[in-house]
Amino acid sequence: MSWKTVIALSFAGMFATGCALEPSDSDAQALEELVVTDPNFSFATSRSVRLEVNPSTEIAGGHALEVSDDEGRRLLKGAVLGKSVVQLPLPTAQGRELRIRSGRSAAEQTVVVDADNRAVANF
Amino acid sequence: MMKPRLLLALITALAAPASLAVAQPIAGQAGVDSDGDGIDDDIDAAPCDPDVSLLMSVPSNQNWGMFLFEDQWPSRGDFDFNDAVIAYQETIRINSANQVTGLEVNLQVMAVGARFANGLALRLPKTATTSVGRISLKVGGEGRPVTLRPSGFLAESVIDLAPDLHALFGAVDVRDWINTDPTQPAQPYVAITLDVEILPGAGLSTADAPFDLFIFNPTRGTEVHRPEFGGTSALNGAHFGTFDDGSTAQRRFVTKAGIPFALALPEPVLYAQEGTAIDALYSGIVPFGASSGQQSTNFYRTANPGVAFGNLPVLQPLPAVVPLTSCFAPLNGVCGGAAGNPAVDAPATALCDLGAASSVVSNNGYWQWTCTGNYSVGTLCEARDLVCTQNVSESCTINNGTGSRQCNGSGTGFSACQTTACNAGYYLDANVCSPQVCTPNSTRSCTASIPNSSAATETCNNLGSRYHACALSTCLSGYQPSGDTCVGQTTNGFQGGTWHVQQGTSGQETYCGSVSSDGLSCYNPLVRYDSHVGTPRQHSNNNVNAWCQQLGFDSSASVAYASSQCTGGALFMATNYDTSRSSLIKWADWQDGPMLNGINSQCYSGASYVSELRCVGPVTVTPPTTGTGGTGGTGGTGSPGQFAAGAWHPQSGTNGQDTFCTTVSNSGKTCHNPLVRYDGYVGTPRQHSNNNIDTWCQQLGFSSHASVTYSSGQCTGGALFMATNYDTSRSSVLKWADWQDGPMLNGINSQCYSGASYVSQVTCN
């Protein structure tokens, strides 16, 4: 099955201007796209992160989502169905990185988002 | 539409016994959606709950955050931010449609350094009360009733968690500082757990988490929220802008320096000792406030520990959620047999027929627990919480004793405690154990108001609660007990020429013209009352039995009348005259009644007067200590074959030995306390094998003896025994002899030996 999902990160009160992770075109991988849309994002000043799940096609069985901070403490775990927006609260000076895992099993993708540089790595 | 797999699971569950243990797992894998929410079990955060597929933890699933409140708003006060120190962790439940469906708030109230009685509440922004479903609140692990109220300004909900934070610790005084004063003992934290069901479609946004936990003080009309929140309608808005408050439209509950009165921090932090301002602990909070929270955002990680209360708090992590590897078709818990079965103790078995049982708690007279199937919402089960087992008795406490009480038929209470026994030294009276006033059945001397008594005793009753009435024991000399009175003791019976007191009459006396030898008959009696003398005349009122008793006898034996003798005037017996002196029946004037006003009657010609009054004993004769009998004396005058009190009875054949009876009974056949004299020598017969009582009786004019008794009490002169070989110059017959040397006629050489047995009475036929 060929499908494409976009996950976009934006931050409360900010404009979404881009900084996207390149999606995979491989049907076998069928990965989601993570997008950080806030050029001024700072963990120190933002209270919440807006996680947008934008599957390009309908995915049967849901879309897995897990977010942890840089100390491995889980903030979010589970799945959503279809296009979804999740507001993730970020208390002041929460850890300096977020680890976002999306997808399932072999199709899982992990993205580390740095406070200043946003999506800095694509595992 | 329900998925075929889910339908299959439900059918399986319905067909199977109501037990989770036998159901087959059907979930936990990709491609399987047990709860039918569209999310496969392997990525579903709650594969068995159709209302949950995503869990959000704030600040995270592994650590606690902390709220620090300063309750002096709008004043800075001591600005120590320890008026309420509360750790928090929130878990938000989200369904597959990305809607918030539930919220679990775990709090640990760590410190209360307030002088105000502050309450604690949670506001759910943008969530109307109509969007709130089931609410469960536990404080210290125990369920509490929930108050859900609108916030007032907006259609938002406020849930009261604690009306008084001090009270959570059992403190009764707001001056009690809890875990802020290092000189005071540390108190354990108090857990508050809140679980709220949010109906899908409510406006609650996860972006507002942690949600608006705030303190409030109804008395002051104050609330303290974080800067992004505006308070509820219970807040007196007039406080804004007063004192040290520097609130703006964007940031409320902040000082003029921009420092919030409520801090929400994402990890455990130090907090200040009582009275230490927050900026002394965290100097970085000053630029943090001045920049409206844009700078120095990590201020809480650089502390001056010397002013902190204790060390960094160590908070136990919440139990980890064990990932489900299997679940079942949605099944509610089913109550077990314990439900509906009233019990005194918390039921421990048969709690659930289906599902896992929670702990059992007592709530408003009911035992309550939940049975949770594979839905997160448990089924509430309950049974009456009985005070006691119906109709069963148990011991209870009674002052100074033991008691018993019975549980009523409904098990809701006991009957009054009934005393069953009293402790030693107490007695039971009207269900009360009272101190005994005397030892049960013991006796003690007392003073009886009985004329002529010398000693009396009173006996404690068998309870020990009181003494019986003082009872006569002995009488003064010359009187003897008769029932409860002392009556005059007749000495030597009637005596001629003597006025005999009539006891109880206060002065009436009887005179005998002559008396019988046994002292029992009084011939031609006269009666006087003071100086007024009269003669008893025959009358139907006369009670000669009472007359004899007044004269010290037991009763009357007979009375005889004759018409010849009368002195002073005629008398008859009556009770209703001279009552000022005595109300007893006694002699009265035949003419007008009273004697004390003089004898007004006459000696009526032909009238019958008492010629002989004969009474029945006791007649007690003072035992003689010397004798004058025998050939050297006048000899006994007693009649043969008839004992008479006070008379010496000759013993025939002894040539002068006589027997004396102190008292006589049995129609003159029984002689009490006999003495024997031989000439002038008096002794007392003592028990001896030589004694021949038949011979003695025969010497006294009887045929034989019927009985003889001995006692150790009475002895006069010395001991005697019967023998033939003494005093033979006078007589050689068997007779009484000196116990010491034999002859009596040389004097009594024996003694009254202590403990020896003497003849106390002899009865002859």
Image (cartoon, rainbow, N blue to C red):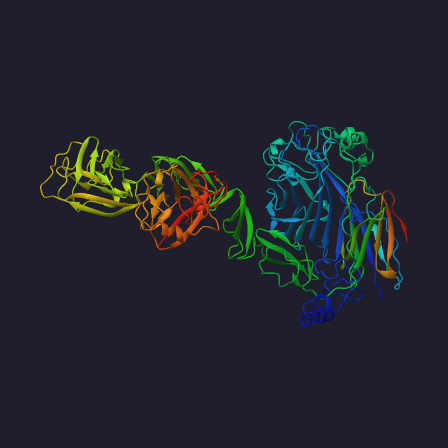
- Residue most toward the left? B605
Say which of A23 and B709 sits in front.
B709
Please count the marks in the image.
0
Residue B405 lies left or right of residue B745; in this view the side is: right
**Position in image of residue A74 (x %, y %):** 81, 50
Q: Which residue is drawn at 86% across and 42% down?
A: A116
Query: Which quarter of the picture shows residue B258?
Result: top right
Please tell me whether residue B337 is drawn above or below residue B481 in the rendered image.
below
Quarter-of-image position of residue B618 = top left
Residue B156 image offset from top left, x and y in percent: 63, 46
Between residues B501 and B763, which one lies in front from this camera angle?
A: B763
In this rendering, does residue B132 appear at all? no
Residue with the most extreme top position: B243
Q: Which of A11 and B327 is in front in this view?
A: B327
Q: Residue at x 60, y 39 (%)?
A: B233
Q: Residue B189, position in %: x, y?
A: 72, 41
Q: In this view, does A57 lie to the left or right of B421?
A: right
Q: Can residue B548 be seen in this view?
A: yes
Compared with residue B119, is residue A37 higher up or lower down, i.e. above or below? below
Left or right, B459 with respect to B107, comes to left
Q: Nearer the viewer, residue B560 or A82?
A: B560
Task: Please indicate whether residue B299 sits to the left or right of residue B76 in the image.
Answer: right
Quarter of the image for the N terminus of chain B: give it: bottom right
Against B63, is A55 above or below?
Answer: below
Quadrant of image for the C terminus of chain B: bottom left
Picture residue at 75% right of the left edge, 65% below the top: B33
Q: Position of residue B709 (x, y in %)?
A: 43, 50
